[in-house]
Amino acid sequence: MSATAPYAGPSPIRRPVAAAALLAALVSLVFGLLLAGAGPASAHAALTGSDPQDGAVVDTAPKEVTLSFSEAIAVGDDSIRVLDPSGKRADTEAEPRDLSEGSTVRYGVALHSGLPDGTYTVAWQAISADSHPISGAFTFSIGAPSETTVALSSQEAGGGPVGVVYDIARYAAYGGFVLLVGGSAFVLICWRGGASALSMQRLVVRGWLTLTVATLVMLLLRNPYTGSGKFADAFDLAGLQSVLDTKPGAALVSRLLLLGAAALFIAVLFGTYARREDEQERKDLTFGLAVGGGVVAAGIAATWAMSEHASTGIQASIAMPVDVAHLLAVAAWLGGLASLLVALYRTPDIGSAAVRRFSAVAFGSVVVLAATGIYQSWRQVGSWSALTGTRYGQLLIIKVALIAVLLAVAWFSRRWTGRLTDTSVVSSGAEVASPGAEAVSSGAEEGDPATEPENTAPAAPDEASDDVAPERAAQLARQRAVLTATKKKRIRDADPERSGLRRSVLAEAAVAVVLLAVTTMLTSTEPGRTEEEAAGGATAATAPAAGGPVNLSMPFDTGGRNGKGTVRIDIDPGRTGSNDLHVWIDGSDGEPMDVPELKVALTLESKDIGPLPVVPDRLAEGHWTASGVQIPMAGDWKIDVTVRTSDIDQVTIDKNAKIG
């Protein structure tokens, strides 16, 4: 609903220019603070280096393989595997050793002695500190590269059918939390009469059920989600025990315990509280429920904060309570919006005072969301390049845009709120006072049972008898209930202000659903800081490096007589290790051209490797070759070619090529 101050006058105050200026200032502030510098903040762990490096060719077999990560990870016995060219384990199969020092996170596995030459594959899988599974693979060679029969699964950690179901449960959990907390807050703060409304009770109970079932599903699937990816392992007791020993497992169990307390809260809210008639007793119970419910809601929100992005990286002690406040504000706003939508469509009793109170709650929620969102954005993004060049940053832009749309629609809802008139519905058979009542009465056809008072409806002959059959009496009671509900709905629908507010709130709710989905996606997306940190790391360890022949063509002009021509270069197989290099020089007429001197050098500038000189031998007219050219690691190599066509005419040309 409206995120502005509640209406306080006889007609809505229209200030679109001021509202637009405020919104623009808020958005500018969010993105401006993204540029504030800070130390590295990680969420999803990323592989930042290894020894040997990806694609490296070493002369002798190393004693161990080490991997460095951007943040703390949880590892098991098979978290790091080293496979020889035939696919057999080349490591000792012991649990990885923790070699971390200070802020450097490093793990290593020992290798068997006497390993033969060839290409070895390192496959790793772990769980980052924010509970998300990560995995990858890379290769290195001993002596010289070789063919390898190792075939690793292309499925990422946390993927496959198990990952899909787990992600659905994550979305459902956030949705259930919003309905549970937001619906309860709406009843306690905005519309206390809603405690007696069956539609509100159903909304809150369904939120509780959704969150409970989703949490149970996540707890059972946690082991296969981070491991085998098989549904059958969901009932592996040993795997479940290992999950309970982890931070995410403890958070899920804590959430289930808190949901037990939430069930008691719901029973009191829609039971004892709804039946209280004494105003003082009701006020005291409201205070108790508000305190107890607030503690339970904050505790449930903390189960996310303690196990996901907020729990790792810089300023975790600040980020966790900020995340709790952010989640509670989201629930109060979006959950209250859903409650208001249900109340407007399902119950005729909600009045303008309740709507205006929710307007104040929504305004406060937006203020909290703005403050906490700015901090979270700075912490997880931190730069313009990460904002626009990473998936996390792009999702964040979409989220801010959706909030802007939601606030714009809320402004229209506020206008309808200002014109809203209360509708009083009394007991069956009594007159209903409503601005649209006269319109309904005058526009209805004479004898329309939906608009006539129930006590004027003609009675059936057997109704006057004292011997009315119970079945007939029950049927008549149902008919009266249907007529009463129809009459109430027509009166409610005849109020144009209430109808306009319903449509506006429905539009808000539609945008809110998309906003909640994007927010959930953000919690499982690698933050911009970490993605950029991983991209600038020493290893792009996502899969074994794949090579292919490199073919280049470079025109040259030494400036002297017959100094123009074209250099063609082939590097085969175009991967790390030993390669064959062929150079052809064609003159300006396209015929093979001999030159007095030809030199080649290779440089990997990103790693400060080179220039590595190559002196090819003349094989035939205009054709030079060199064998055994070593490419130590994969990357974007710069190839310099020096061509001398006379004693004084010489030129050096270069071109970049992906090798490995």
Image (cartoon, helix red, strand yellow):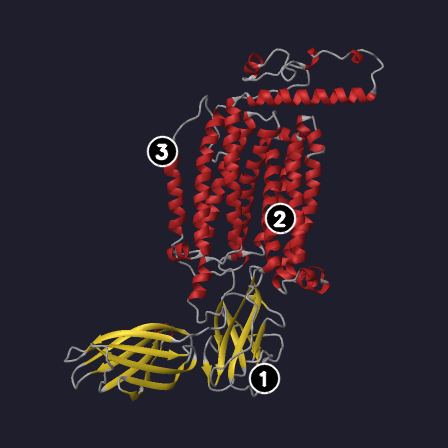
Residue assigned mark 3? 17
Q: Position of residue 173 (x, y in %)?
A: 61, 48
Percent x, y of residue 373 = 47, 48
Picture coordinates of residue 465, whole percent (x, y): 82, 11
Say which element carries label 1.
loop
| Distance in Å between CA atoms under marks 1 and 3 | 72 Å
Task: Give the residue at mark 1.
Answer: 112
Q: Earlier in the sequence, mark 1 or mark 3?
A: 3
Position above or below: 231 against 113: above
Q: In this view, does 483 lie to the left or right of 617?
A: right
Q: Is residue 563 left or right of residue 393?
A: left
Q: Which numbered circle lies on residue 300? A: 2
Q: Which amino acid does label 2 sit on?
A: Ile
Tell me whether circle 3 and circle 2 mark residues in contact (CB < 8 Å). Answer: no
Circle 3: is it few (<14), some (14-19), or many (20+) Cα within 10 Å?
few
Identify the image quadrant of residue 435. Answer: top right
Q: Is residue 530 left or right of residue 218?
A: left
Residue 292 visible in the shown view: no
Q: Quadrant of the C terminus?
A: bottom left
